Amino acid sequence: MQLAAILDRAMSNLKYTKIKQWLIFSSVVFGVSFGISYATNRDLRNALAGGGIGLTASSIGVLALDWRQRKSLIENFSSLQANSSEVEKRYENLKRLHAKKTSQLKQLKQDLTKVEDAISNLGRNQQQLEDTLKQLEQQKVHLSNEIVEKESQAQSLCLEVQQLEQEQQHQCQRLEEQLAQKRDQIQALQESVEELTNQLDTLAKQKIEVEDDIKVLQTSKEKLHAAITDAKDLLKELNKLGEYQILKTAPENQSIIISHKEIDDIEEANSNTLPIELSSENSNTPVNQPSDAKNTTLIEEATDKYPEKSIVNTCQLDFDIKNARHNQAFWETEILPNWQHSDRPVGQRFLGSVRIDQDISDYLLQVIGENLRRLDGLTYDRLYQEFDEPQQNWLKLLTLALSEYAYYYSEDRFWEGFCERLDLPIGKSVENTLRKIVLDGINNLGLIKSQSGYTYVSTLWLQSGIPKQNLNHFAQLVQEVSDAYGWWELAHTHDQELSQTLMDFSQTKHAAWGTLNNFLKVSCSEQTDDVALSGQLVRGIAMVAQQLEQQGQSSQALLDPKQREDLLSQYYLPSSFFLRDWSTVAQVLTPKSSESKQRLRRQQRSLCLQLDIETLNTQLVLPEQ
């Protein structure tokens, strides 16, 4: 369409041009014809006619020429029109191509913008990477230096390890030599054990014979007691009526009259002679000799001296703890022979191992209460003034009474409860006095001590292992812990870790068990050198349960004191292991399956160096596993 319009405009312009040219040409022809005619003829009319003829002839020539040109133009125009359609199609295609290229150009510009942004980001990232690379290079240098240092340290450690290995080899050699010596000693000890076993069998037979003699002497003792009572009654009557009147009015009764001198001799035999003879006998008698054997010796001597009388047992007499002989007699006849731990090292003795009945414990509490109430004031200095005794047996008996009270009767208010039971005044001064006395008694007897908590009360609780009122709770706790972990895990766990586990277990599941939780808390020491008593106690129980299970024995054997002593002596139990009452614990010592048991959390224990003072050798000691 645009091309056709262009052609139309071109044709109109051509026509205008031709007309303009025709007018110019006609004017020139007319002027030339008019000029020639007028110049020739000098006739204006002829000149005008000649000009008109020339004008007409020129017009005819121009028209002919224009017709021919137009004809050629029409022919050319038809071909141009045919080409114009193709040109228009090409133009449309080019226009669409131009639009497409324009959109592509815009897209390319946008892509170019993005590429430029990406290039700028890459430039920034390149800068950051270069900075990071510099830092990494610096770190590389630092790490290289550290590696060099570590390699030097590793070399030094290797040298130390080699030295330690050499020392360990030397130690192993020494240990093997010592082991051979120990085996020889064990062989010798086994032979000694066989000899001692034979001696024990002989002593057992002698014990049976002595028991038979004791029965006979018991009868004599009752007769002597009755004779003393009759003598005292007769003495009272003599004081009232007079010896002369009795002899005069009743001569037939002279055979039953006992003089003052004989009465004094009888009383002296029971109050003075008996403790003195007892002391001399104890100096020649082993500590662990049964009290029945000692009493038998004394009774035989007293019977030889007074054949018609019998000796009264010391614990059946009301004694005064101010009397040193009474204290010595009671301690050395009733207590010391029955104290299993009397021969243990200082600091490893449990006072609860004294084998006495609760009746004797109550009697001891009653006697001590009566004697303490007679004092004007219960103070530390006053007690030592009143009971001035070199051997301090009164202190031992008072400590024993407190230990027995802690086992049978103690509750949260320990000192107040003790004062109430003995009918003593309650107050801070009395409590402080008793605390000082307890500390002196603990040190005097070499008892095991509590490392934390309430020092005095906790130590008294520990003397029997577990207080009697907490035995059921303790047995239940042992059963629950053994069900959770198994006997093997408990027997092979460090005492401190086991104490912590027991305390956490009890406080989590049995928060209402106040007294037992306090005992477990006291036994759980934070110091690595302290003895974790609750852990050691449960570990020993677990070891006993394992041994019973391996040997196929029933836990009921622990209920009999003699069988229990024989069994426990065969096991390698901890040195401070002690439990006074096995009646409830023995019920829970049942076999446990080793499958699906939990594991106790172990604490990491580092190596330590130990200096042997004798050889001045440094040893690398492994932690207890």
Image (spheres, helix red, strand yellow):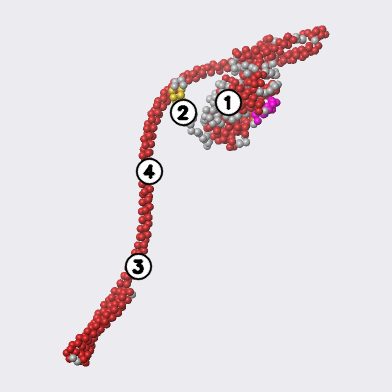
Q: From the viewer's perspective, is the residue at label 1 or at label 4 nearer?
A: 4
User: Helix, strand or loop at disc 2?
Assistant: strand
Mark 4 is surrounded, within 10 Å at the Cα level, by few (under 14), some (14 to 19) or many (20 or more) other residues, namely: few
- Please state which amino acid type lies under the numbered disc 1: Lys
Mark 2 is surrounded, within 10 Å at the Cα level, by few (under 14), some (14 to 19) or many (20 or more) other residues, namely: few
- Please state which amino acid type lies under the numbered disc 3: Arg
Figure check: 250 above or below 366: above
Going from N to C along the chain, the mark reached first, 2 or 1, is 1
Residue at 72% x, 11% y: name it: 264
Task: Tell me the quadrant of the picture where the N terminus can be found.
Answer: bottom left
In this picture, which residue range is highlighted in magenta? Answer: 413-426
Distance from Cα at disc 1 to Cα at disc 4: 62 Å
Going from N to C along the chain, the mark reached first, 2 or 4, is 4
User: Helix, strand or loop at disc 1?
Assistant: loop
Q: Disc 3 marks which residue?
A: 96
Residue at 64% x, 20% y: name it: 384
Going from N to C along the chain, the mark reached first, 1 or 4, is 4
Q: Disc 4 marks which residue?
A: 135
Q: From the viewer's perspective, is the residue at label 2 or at label 4 nearer?
A: 4
Mark 3 is surrounded, within 10 Å at the Cα level, by few (under 14), some (14 to 19) or many (20 or more) other residues, namely: few
Q: Disc 1 marks which residue?
A: 449
Q: Quadrant of residue 135?
A: top left
Q: Position of residue 414 (x, y in %)?
A: 65, 29
Total numbered labels: 4
Name the mark on residue 205: none
Q: Disc 2 marks which residue?
A: 608
**In-front residue for pair 18/555:** 18
Going from N to C along the chain, the mark reached first, 2 or 3, is 3
Question: Residue 421: within the magenta?
Answer: yes
Q: Position of residue 58 (x, y in %)?
A: 22, 86
User: Helix, strand or loop at disc 3?
Assistant: helix
- Please state which amino acid type lies under the numbered disc 4: Gln
